[in-house]
Every structure is written in C-alpha cells, then in structure tokens.
Image (cartoon, rainbow, N blue to C red):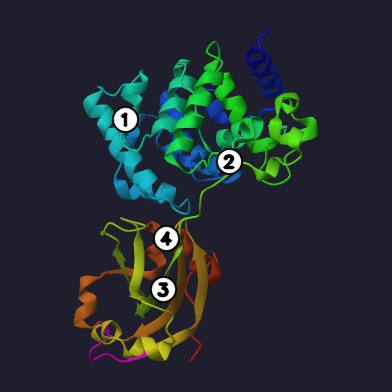
Amino acid sequence: MSDKKHLAVRLERWFEENKRLLPWRETTDPYLIWVSEIILQQTRVAQGLDYYNRFVARFPDVAALADADEDEVLKYWEGLGYYSRARNMHAAARQVMHDFGGRFPDTYEGIRSIKGVGDYTAAAIASFAYGLPHAVVDGNVYRVFSRLFAIDTPIDTTAGHKLFAALADEWLDRRRPDVYNQAVMELGALLCLPRSPQCPVCPLSEWCEAAALGRPEAYPVKQGKSEVRPRYFNYLVIHCDDDVFISRREKRDIWRNLYEFVLIESEGALSMEELQQTASYRSLFDGVEVKVVARPFERRHVLSHRVIHAVFYTLEIDKASPRLASYMRVPFADVKHYAFARLTGLYFDHLGQSSRRPSLDWEE
Ligand code: SF4
C-alpha cells in the first residue's frame, strides 16, 4: 500500500472510531450541510449545535428559508456574530429557488455560484452531500498539513493558499472524499490542536515531520497579523415612558440590518461630560431635559479586525426631541423581538434576563 493510501486508511479508521456525533454528519441533504457549514465558519461546534437545531427546526428546507423575512432569519442568528452569513444565506436560498428551481445544485461549480459560498464550503457540500472528489481546506487542514510536512510557507499568502490547496487535493482519498475530508478536519479539531497537539495518540504521527522535529507548535507559519482597529461606540439607551429608541443599521458596516440603540461613535474614549459636549449628543436632546439614570455599562468587545470599546448609558427623558423622531420608538418590553448584535446582548445580560428594565436609581 502506498504511503498516501496507508495514511488515508489510518486517518479514516481513527475518524470512524473517534468522531463526534453531530446531526449534520447523519445526513446527505445539501441544504442541511450548507446550514451547518455556514454556522460553523466562525463558531465553535458546541455553540453552533444549538443554533443549528433551532435554525433547521424553523427553516427545514431551502423553500422555508427563502420564504422567511430577513428580520426573522437574523433573529435566529442573534448572538452568533458575522451576520453577513445569515443575510447571504437568506439571499442564497432565494437564488436557489429562482435559479435552480428550488433544487440545491449538485455540481461543485453550481454550489460555488451560490451567494456566500466560497471554495471551502463548496468543497464541503460537494463531498459530504454528493461524494464529489473536492478537498476542503480550512484552518484545521492548514494546521494538519503544515505539520505533517513541516511547511514554512506562510498560510496567509497567495503562495500558501495555492500550495495547501494543491497538497490537500493530492492527498485526497478520491474513493471516500466525504469521510476523508471530515477526518482531516476532525483530527485538527480534536488532536492536532493549535496548542499542545496530542501527537502520542495521533494516527498520523509516524508520517509527521513537525512531530519528528519536536516542534509541532511552530506550524503553521503566518506572515503577519492584520491590524486590529479600535472603535468607540457610545450607546444611549433612552427611555421615554415605557419606550426606548432603536434603529436598524443600514450602512455597509459591521452588523448590517441588525438593530441597535442610539449610537454616537467617537474617535476615542469619551467621558459622559465629553460626550454631552458633542454636537451629535446636543442635537439629539435639543430642548429636552435628560436624566442619566443608571451606571454606565462598559464592555471591550473583540471582533476579527476591530476592537469595539462600548459604553451603554441609560437615560430618561419625558418627551421626545424632534431629532429622535428619525428613530423607531418601541416598548422596552418588546426589544427582545428585534435582532441585536451580541454586544448589546451582553448589555441585556447585564440587566438580567428576567427583566430588561434597568434600575432607575442612579444619578451621575
Ligand atoms: S503528530 Fe502531532 S503535529 Fe503531527 S498531525 Fe498528529 S497531532 Fe498534528
């Protein structure tokens, strides 16, 4: 048996004996596999599982998803982050209904043409649902292959992308691409971990050059981290009678189409006094008396390329200013029906799950 076949057999046997039992592994329905893959793109399995179960219970097939309102889809995604995934899926479901007559495409090219589906997801759906010989390349695959062959080429370069795609394709078990692809990724998720890989119990250890060198953690190599840009969000949770003011984020920016409280973004961190001096704050409350009624809630929230420094101020007014007319005025008890970013979810958590009404006993 060649090395290649031997390695694949060993890997697949390990997978069959050690794989986690997950609902999307028990199906060849391309829609369900697609949903799971999109959820798992930026989410850990433990967290993604609940979302997956709830999502497919409400949207069991592509027609159900295409029929839904985007607001409802985003509500089911609330807290998962990277909301463009949900928006793209919703648009893609409509694309499948329109362009493919409601049948999920069954070729790699057809799958790849769906909105929001990149090389990795197309290969995953093509191999898991249809057994097509396309190799997946995700973070786990980069890690496993860079260690197996002690590859110094940075994975975040064009040369790295090409090299690893070629290598993954070369080593793919074309007889069982579905099992093989899942096995490599599962190895990366369970044994070939970023820190402290479990080499002594790894089924590939006899081939692994990085393990032989005694420094598996030196791989994969990355050229450089992208700069993390700080942003400063001052959220004003403005209560008027039993209502608050919210708006939908419409611009091309993070959290598009999610809801939020009144936001003043600033160039740097501001105290309440400094915030009150800004033109944005003054125009919001022109002619209106404002009371700061709860201690500010502060949170540093890390996204992939940004750190959001957020402060939530709870304010109370007795009448709405003209400027606030451009916001949606909704009962505070109903805000849970709108999809907010996880950051605001943390504010709600802070208020307490049972009652989201903040205590009104704090004076600045
Ligand atoms: S031997 Fe260690 S470094 Fe090599 S593939 Fe296995 S777990 Fe990863």
Q: CA distance from mark 1 to mark 2?
A: 26 Å
Q: Amino acid at mark 1?
A: Ala
Per the image, label 3 sits on a secondary structure element best described as: strand
Q: Which residues are magenta?
A: 284-290
On the question of residue 97 being in view, the answer is: yes
Disc nearer the start of the sequence (1/3): 1
Left or right of residue 16: residue 106: left
Q: Which residue is mark 2?
A: 45
Horizontal and vertical percent for residue 312? 44, 76
- CA–CA distance in space, label 1 to label 4: 26 Å
- Along the polypeptide, which appears first: circle 3 or circle 4? 3
Residue at label 4?
A: 336
Q: Which residue is mark 3?
A: 232
Q: Identify which residue is drawn at 39% across, 76% down.
A: 234
Residue 81 placement (x, y as % from top left): 45, 52
Q: Are marks 1 and 2 in contact (CB under 8 Å)?
A: no
Check the image and report above or below for 1 versus 243.
Answer: above
Residue 28 visible (yes or no): no
Q: Which mark is residue 63?
A: 1
Structural distance between the alpha carbons of marks 2 and 3: 31 Å
**Mark 1 crowd level (few <14, some 14–19, many ≥20, 10 Å Cα):** some
Q: Residue at x 29, y 45 (%)?
A: 69
- Residue found at the very far right of the displayed protein: 200
